[in-house]
Image (cartoon, helix red, strand yellow):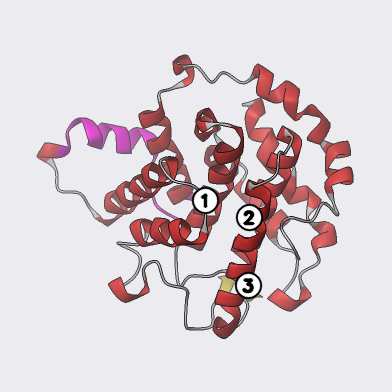
Amino acid sequence: MNVSDKKYFKEYSKRIGCRIDDLIGKFDFSEKNGKFEYLTKASAVYSSNIEGNGVDLNSYMNYELSKKKFKAGKEIEEIENLISAYNFARKNNLNEKNFLTVHKLLAETLLIKSKRGKYRTEPIGVFGRTGLEYLAVEPEFVKTYMSRLFEEVEELNAKELSPEEVFYFASLIHLRIAHIHPFADGNGRVARLAEKWFVANKLGKEFWKIPSEEYYKNNQNKYYQTMNLGVNFYELDYDKCIDFLVLLPRCLQK
C-alpha cells in the first residue's frame, strides 16, 4: 500500500470528496470558533481520551485555571506532553525526523526514555475483549516501511494538490501509520496528529483548527471499526478503506 496512490480517489470523491470545497467554505476558521491555543489543547485532550485518558476537556481547562494549586497527575502530564507535540508540529514541516521528534515529546509519560522517538524493537499487537485483534508488522521491518511512507509524503509535499486530494492522502497517512504501529506506545496519538499535520502543511495553518480528534472521539466505535482492515499487517484489505477515509471530512460538518 502506497499512501501516494490514488487508487481509491475516484470512489472517495463520489462518497464525499466532491463536497470538501463546500465544507471548507462553510467551516468557521475565525477566533469565534476558538483560538489556536485553546483548540490545540482540545485536540490533545480528545486524542488522549480515545486512548483511555479520563480527563475531559472541561476538567483539563479548569485544571489550567488553577494549576498552581494542584500537582499534575499522570493523565494531565500525558495531555500536556501531547500539547507540546502539537505545538512543535505547528512550527515544523512533516517529515520523518520531525515525526520522530513529535513522538519523543508526546511519549514522555508513556515510555522509558530509550524508546521515545525511536521505532519499536519488539512485536506488538492490538488486543480487545476477546483477545488479539490485530498483529502489526515485525519490528525489523518497521524502519523500512516508515522510511518508504515518508518518501511518499515528500512526493506529496512537492505536488500541488486539491483540497479533496489533501484530505484523501492525509487519511491514508493516518491509516498507514496506525497499521504499521511503529512505536511501542503512542501510535494512535501520533497517527491522528500526522493526519492533521499533513492537511495544515498543504492547505494552511488555520487547518490545525479542524476538530478531527473530537469527531473521532465522538464516533469512536466507527473510527476503530473502519480502521480494522485485517487481522494482521499482511492481510490488510485496503479495498475496504473508503469507510475510514470519509471520516475526516465529516469533522467539518460540526
Residue 153 - label: 2
Name which residue lies at 85% across and 60% down.
239
Q: Residues within 10 Å of mark 2 (few under 14, many from 20)?
A: many
Name which residue lies at 37% across and 46% down.
88
Tag 3: amino acid = Tyr
Determine the CA span between mark 1 and mark 3.
17 Å
Spot occupied by residue 230 in the image (x, y as percentages of width and height) = 75, 70
Q: Is residue 39 above or below residue 48?
A: above
Residue placed under numbered mark 1 in the picture: 94
| Helix, strand or loop at mark 3 | helix
Spot occupied by residue 142 in the image (x, y as percentages of width and height) = 57, 76
Quadrant assignment for the N terminus: bottom right
Spot occupied by residue 139 in the image (x, y as percentages of width and height) = 55, 82
Q: Which residues are magenta?
A: 50-67
- Magenta region includes residue 60: yes
Dots 1, 2 in contact, CB < 8 A: yes
Magenta stretch: helix, strand or loop mostly: helix
